[in-house]
Amino acid sequence: MNSALIQKYNIPGPRYTSYPTVPFWDQKGISAADWKDSLVHCFNESNDKEGISLYIHLPFCESLCTFCACHKKITKQHDVETPYIDALLKEWDLYCDLFPKKPKIKEIHLGGGTPTFFSMEHLSLLITGILKKAEKAADFEFSFEGHPNHTSREQLQGLYDLGFKRNSFGIQDYDEVVQKAINRVQGFDQVQKVHDWSREIGYTSISHDLIFGLPFQNEKSIRDTIKKTVSLRPDRIAYYSYAHVPWIKGVGQRGFEDADLPKDEVKRHLYELGKQLFFENGYVEIGMDHFSLPSDNLFQAMKNKKLHRNFMGYTAGKTALMIGLGMSSISDSWYAFAQNEKSVTDYTARVNRGEFPVFRGHLLNDQDLIIRRHILNLMCNLETEWSYGLDESTKKGIVKRLESLIDDGLLDITDNKVKVKEEGRMFVRNICMAFDLRLIENKPETRIFSMTI
Ligand SMILES: C[S@@+](CC[C@H](N)C(=O)[O-])C[C@H]1O[C@@H](n2cnc3c(N)ncnc32)[C@H](O)[C@@H]1O
Ligand code: SF4
């Protein structure tokens, strides 16, 4: 890969799990009335047709991994479980009271933090409590994130019996030096154990999360990590670019120095190497950051242009309405976004007062909705059609901003579409930035995003 291109395009930029991206949501937020209206509107339009998705954030972890950019709370005290599950079920009640009929659930995803921090008894109370007020769509998909060091066979079996057929495990890297630096020591044996249990029990899609760009990683450590990973044949592999955001995560991202991180070019090489090794082992690339076996439904969705991207990343099961329960969760009614309080205490207090625990949000205007569609098309299908709603002057501005990317051979523009070339795939975030009117209007002066490459 051309290192000049990497230097040119490695700039701070969004990961586009939403448009507008969170830092450019309306400063004045969203009123409770507008948020509720948008929810009911979206529910009425989509519940019967495609159902709704639920993202449930379970924030607790027993120890801090020093690379982690997720919203989590570190504790070894398991008495936090009961009040938190109570709050989640109360929050769900608020939504169910608002909807005119029983929601039809297409997807549930338990994310974290570490969902498997919770005992099986509590996870079971949570899921049965949710389903009491809902029905399952015929083709429902339930999934959860598990930490290999904190997932028992009992939890895997219990969740499977509740309808969970997909899971993902955080691996990151198998190298001992890297693991020590990120405070996450976990052996291959442990991963193999939870992976094999999942297969024996009947999970149909198992995903492993890896990260490139972590401190002390090099070609040898990545080769070894990938060799071990593909030996287990996970159905999906997420190969994330390490997002180094110490200005947001503060003391959480420590235990190593900036100088311990691989330099831009080395990091890019690690990505290229990973990609080549996944291809050699029969995996295909999905959108950005993801690889899957051709048998996995993520690949089928990509082939049929049915891939969708939301705050959980890529998904095969698109629903317009995604409700996020729990501290820091973001909900998406297609017409609006809303984010919950970011501390467990504030979140629980507001739910216990019978309020939606939303602390910020954004109501999309007509132009946001058009740009949102284009960015989603680019992130999922690597192409988008001009015919979708843009006025001439906005289109002209976008074309102008894309000029250098075209000159660099990263995409093609025709009268009716923008198409990302294979060489441009790793620059898709930069390509989306040319469409991102909110980013362009706001010209952020401080670093709020991780680097694009
Ligand atoms: C919530 S965590 C996974 C669940 C579980 N807590 C675990 O650690 O195994 C989801 C994934 O986000 C990814 N992740 C977290 N922080 C990241 C960062 N700074 N850059 C890139 N990926 C990150 C990791 O791959 C992690 O496995
Ligand atoms: S990577 Fe997972 S276990 Fe580690 S701190 Fe983040 S959420 Fe918790």
Image (tube, rainbow, N blue to C red):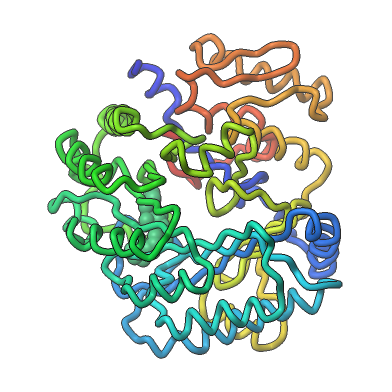
Judged left or right of residue 304, residue 397 is right
Task: Please say whether residue 75 is visible from this viewpoint.
Answer: yes
Judged left or right of residue 271, residue 115 is right
Quadrant field for ligand 1: bottom left
Task: Please say whether residue 251 is visible from this viewpoint.
Answer: no
- Is residue 44 placed above or below 380 in the rendered structure? below
Q: Give residue 259's quadrant in the image.
A: top left
The residue that appears at 77% across and 49% down in the rendered structure is 364
Report the label total: 0
x, y (%) of residue 47?
A: 78, 60
The residue that appears at 35% across and 77% down in the rendered structure is 154
x, y (%) of residue 415?
A: 74, 11
Q: Give residue 391's quadrant in the image.
A: top right
Quadrant that contains the C terminus: top left
Q: Residue furthest top?
A: 407
The residue that appears at 37% across and 42% down in the rendered structure is 239
x, y (%) of residue 236?
A: 41, 45
Quadrant that contains the N terminus: top left
x, y (%) of residue 348?
A: 58, 83
Foreground of the two, 85 or 410: 85
- Is residue 417 placed above or below 322 in the rendered structure? above
The residue that appears at 53% across and 48% down in the rendered structure is 313
